Structure formats: C-alpha cells, structure tokens
Image (spheres, rainbow, N blue to C red):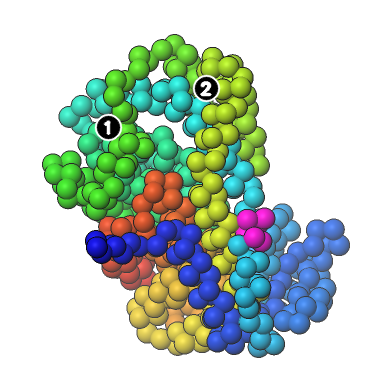
Amino acid sequence: MKKKKLSFPSALTVLFIVLIFAAILTAVVPAGLYSKLAYNAQSNMFEITDSVGKITEMEPTQETLDELGVTGNLDKFLDGTISKPVAIPGTYEKVEQNPQGIFQILLAPISGVYDSIDIILFIFVLGGCIGVLNYMGAFNSAIAVLSKITKGKEYLLIILITIIIAAGGTTFGLAEETIALYPILVPVFLAAGYDVMVCIAAIYMGSSIGTMFPTINPFSVGNASNAAGISLADGMGIRFVALAIGLIITLVYILRYAKKVKADPSQSICYDQYEYHMKKFGHQGEVPKFTGRMKLTLAVFGITFAVLVWGLVTKQWWFDNMTALFLACAIIMAFTSGIGEKNFMDQFIGGAADLMSVALVVGVARGINIILENGMVSDTILAYFSGAISGMNPIIFIILMMFVFIVLGFFISSSSGLAVLSVPIMAPLADTVGVSRAAIVSAYAYGLGLISFITPAGLILASLAMVDVTYDKWLKFIMPLMGITAGFSAVMLVIQLFV
C-alpha cells in the first residue's frame, strides 16, 4: 500500500489554526484597555471613552490634548484626518477577562465576512470579468503577443511590475487592490519561463516594500505622523532612501531566483505543481487568433484599471467605488465580447465562483482580528512592551522598537489602526531616551511592513490562494529576504538617529 504523503494545510486551515491560537491568547493574556480619545463633529467636543465604556466630554482645544498627553495636531482631529479613536498615554487599566470560547470562534469568521463584504464583493465582480476574458481566450492570445515582444528580455517584466506596484504602495498604500493582478499576470510570467512564485514575489513584495518604506502614504505614515505630533515631511527623506535601497535588494533577490528557475524549472519551489499551474494559467494547445473583439474587450478591462488608479490616487476611492467600476466594466464587456447574454452570465458567475476561496480567506483573516479585539488583549500587549523598552540606550531602543511593532503588527494588521493605537503611547517614550519621533514613525512602518511579509492575518494567504500556492512554500521563499530586509531596516533606523 502506497504511503500517503503529508501536505501543508490550505490557507483556510492555517487561518483557522491561527484563529484558535488567538482565542487561547484571550484566555491567557490579561485583558485591558487604554482610554480612547475621539472628536465628535456633531457635538464639536472631544469624547474620552475609558476602560469601562464611560464617556467624558472635553473642549476640543490644544490645551486638552496637552493635558491628556496626546501628541496629535488639533487641526487633524477637527478636519477628520485623525478619524479613529486615539489611545491616551498612561491610561491603561486591566478589565474583566473576556475569553473567546467555541461559539465566538465559530462566529468570528462569519463576522469577518460581514466586515469584509466590500472587499469580497470586489473579488467576486473581478472574478466574473476574468472568467469572461478567459472563456474568450483573450488572455492567452494577448500573452502570446506579449511573449514575442519581450523575448530575451523577460526580466524587464519583473523590474517594471515590482517598481510600479511599489510606487503605489509608498504613495497611497496599494495593497488589497493588487489581488486583481494575479489572474492577469500569472499567465504572463509562466509564458516568460518563470514560475508562479516569481509573479507572487513581484506583486506582493512590490506592494510590501512600498508600504514598508512609505513616503506620503496617508493610511500608514500619515496617521502615524499625526499621532506622533510631527509633520509628514519629518523623516521622509531617509525613508525614501530606504525605499530605493530596499527595492534594489528585493529586485536582486527575485531576479536571482527567477534566473535560476528559467534556466532549470526543477529549481522552482513550486515545481511539484508545475503541470497544474500550466494547465490552469498557461495557454494550452493552439493559441486563438487575437481578434478585434478580444482587443476591444481587453481594452475595456485595461481602461477600467486606469480609471481605478485615478480614483484611488485623486478621489481616495474605497472598495464600494472600485466594485461599481468593475460592474460597469462587466456591463460593457457583455456587449463587446459578443458571446451572447446567457453564455456571458454563465461565464461571469463561473469566474466569480472560482474566487470563492479567496473571498473566504479574506473574511476568516478579519475574524482573527475580531477575536483579539473582543478579547481585549491587544492593549495589554502594547502596555507590556511600552513599559519594557522605556529608558534604554537610544540605539538598542530604536531597534527593539521595530521588533515591538513587528509583534504588534501581528495582532493589529491595520496600518491606520496600529498607528492611532500605538504611536501616541510610543512617541513620548522616544523623548525620554533622546530619540526623534520621526524615528518612531519609521520603526512603526518598518516593523509593520516586515510582519506583513508572513502574517496569516494579513494579505499573503489571500494572495497565495489566488494562485493555489501553499503557505509553507511562500515561507521557504521569503524568509531569507525577510532576514536581509530586517537587518537593513535596523541599520537605516540607527542611521536616522544621527541624521
């Protein structure tokens, strides 16, 4: 009898394991909360919510902020820039334990799907559009043309895509939106002689490096700078240098792996799935002629992406606008595809169904955060670390601060959420050891960026699910680069102390 080979669990199974671990933490780690400060525009008052939920109002003045020890700029509260409740330093209190049991564990992924419905709907509509294009053979035909154009210079695909996505990450936090790119670009990379891991690395690491070394990203460095009471420009120069060098390090790493795989496909980390990936994403048999209808329908799809970028950058669109945009794209494609109404609907619904697993991964990942929020342990972890690192040597302090943010980023994966919760607590600690608050903002960005490489509660499992690659293969690929990037980030933080 042939012995069954053990395989690494799927993305959803990994997430449920992490979900159970998070629930165990809520029973082991003491529960506690900081008092939170928020501005109520309707009453034109600051509202302070303490650990037991009691709300106290105070005048929205700079004197109030100074009295509370909150470093955010008053104008940023009043104009809505700081929209989430900010943790008030020195107000941490233990509260009654609220361990999350079996029922809460079962409810968390359901609540996570509800909370993530905007992203999930976007994924479904996008999947429908892709299903139609795949049925037409438009992608296969376009890829065949592109392969001829890039013959001998396929490495340019890696460089261009990584740099473009990193630019989006550092400026407006391009992250979840990259989910749309995998079904489009994986066939291009396979046709160029690479494996799916090269495509994942180019897209995901482009986004991760961009968001890790932010320049004007309002969701991460913008919120963190406001919470620290400093200008967005403080530390921007050194982070831009870090972005450029970090991008070069990442590209060299990806290109070395890509060259090795192109020369010998058996060197691929995903080689055991080579035939499966080629069957699913590669063009099979005779490539259909690139017809006028294909070109027109692909043009509609491409223009939709151009409008998407415009909306993200200039109008601060979120997933409701993005989904509406791709719904409009689908309606236009129903006419340009020429495949008939019934056939179009069958292919659209089938394409959406193909991304069901991705949608569930997004929802369950959000469920992990819900468990930790309801268990009220995130503030306890923050209070512990803030006390442990105060009063240290500046160099040791700033390096440890980055690792503190790595740990906190595992429990609070939202960039804006982590900024408004932790930076108001950590920024005053920097003053006591002679470290600039801009360095704290950089430590926050670098730490959160590093943990985003691997945290199951983040975007990586959804990205892997898009191309059917297991988490262990990603870890095997990324851990050396993560170590190199962590060392580089620590060096940049130390340099920032002296510039």
Q: Earlier in the sequence, mark 2 or mark 1?
A: 1
Quarter-of-image position of residue 488: bottom left
Given the current orientation, which residue lies at the most extreme top position? Answer: 292
Q: Is residue 193 above or below residue 395?
A: above
Q: Amino acid at mark 1?
A: Ala
Q: Is residue 144 magenta?
A: no
Closer to the eye: label 2 or 1:
1
Q: Is residue 408 above or below residue 215?
A: below
Q: Amino acid at mark 2?
A: Val
Q: Is residue 401 left or right of residue 225?
A: left
* Dominant secondary-structure state across the stretch colored magenta: helix
Q: Determine the residue positioned at 53% across, 17% down.
A: 339
- Tag 2's secondary structure? helix
Position of the N terminus, as image quadrant, is bottom left
Q: Is residue 450 left or right of residue 421?
A: left
In this rendering, the count of numbered labels is 2
Count neighbours of disc 2 (C-alpha within 10 A) and say few if under 14, some if 14 to 19, many if 20 or more: some
Query: Residue 241: x and y, percent?
Result: 34, 54
Q: Determine the residue positioned at 47% across, 63% down.
A: 13
Residue bounds of the magenta highlight: 110-115
Task: Specify whether residue 252 is in view.
Answer: no
**Observer-nearest residue: 347 or 317?**
347
Q: Determine the residue positioned at 36% across, 56% down.
A: 470
Position of the C terminus, as image quadrant, is bottom left
Q: Between marks 2 and 1, how big is the CA–CA gap?
A: 23 Å
**Observer-nearest residue: 68 or 272?**
272
**Observer-nearest residue: 342 or 138?**
342
- Write down the residue under mark 2: 300
Count neighbours of disc 1 (C-alpha within 10 A) and say few if under 14, some if 14 to 19, many if 20 or more: many
- Write down the residue under mark 1: 191
